[in-house]
Image (tube, grey):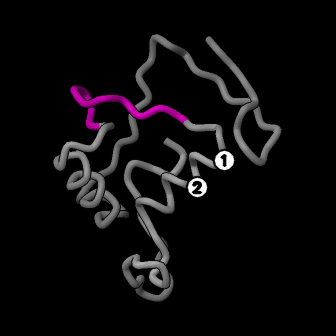
């Protein structure tokens, strides 16, 4: 087991058990089908993170890298990004912090 408190903006401690693969299960028939469809399509495009054979995602703790990832995947509409419907946020994949 490995633990650290490198989560930006918090003093919380997070732990990893190397022998366990972290898997985020989403379902097209679950409570968030749009999210599940987005993840499925992103992974099918060749982006990392597809389980079990894809390149794994890794946590980023550097805030500048996290911001760059998010701004690349989800640029604001005012800077060439896509307009978003009211009450929706950008559903980036891979996630901003990976």
Q: Mark 2 points at which residue?
A: 67
Residue 20 location in percent, x, y? 45, 17
Measured Cα–Cα span from mark 1 to mark 2: 6 Å
All told, the count of numbered labels is 2
Q: Does the magenta stretch include residue 68?
A: no
Q: Name the residue under label 1.
A: 63
91 shown above or below 6 = below
Locate residue 77: give its quadrant: bottom left
User: Which residue is at 57% across, 49% downward?
Assistant: 66
**What predominant SS class does the magenta segment belong to?**
loop
The numbered mark at residue 33 is: none
Q: Position of residue 84 (x, y in %)?
A: 41, 82
Based on the displayed image, in which of its 4 quarters is residue 24 positioned?
Answer: top left
Residue 80 in the image: x percent, y percent?
40, 78
Front residue (pair 5, 31) = 5
Residue drawn at 30 percent across, 29 percent down:
55
Region of the chain picked out in magenta, as a range? 50-59
């Amino acid at each position: 087991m490995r633990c650290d408190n490198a989560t930006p903006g918090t003093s919380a401690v997070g732990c990893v058990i190397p022998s366990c693969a972290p898997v985020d299960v989403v379902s097209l028939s679950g409570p968030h089908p749009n999210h599940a469809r987005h993840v499925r399509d992103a992974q099918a495009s060749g982006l990392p993170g597809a389980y079990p054979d894809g390149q794994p995602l890794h946590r980023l703790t550097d805030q500048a890298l996290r911001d760059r990832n998010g701004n690349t995947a989800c640029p604001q509409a005012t800077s060439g990004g896509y307009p978003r419907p009211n009450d929706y946020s950008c559903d980036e994949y891979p996630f901003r912090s990976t």
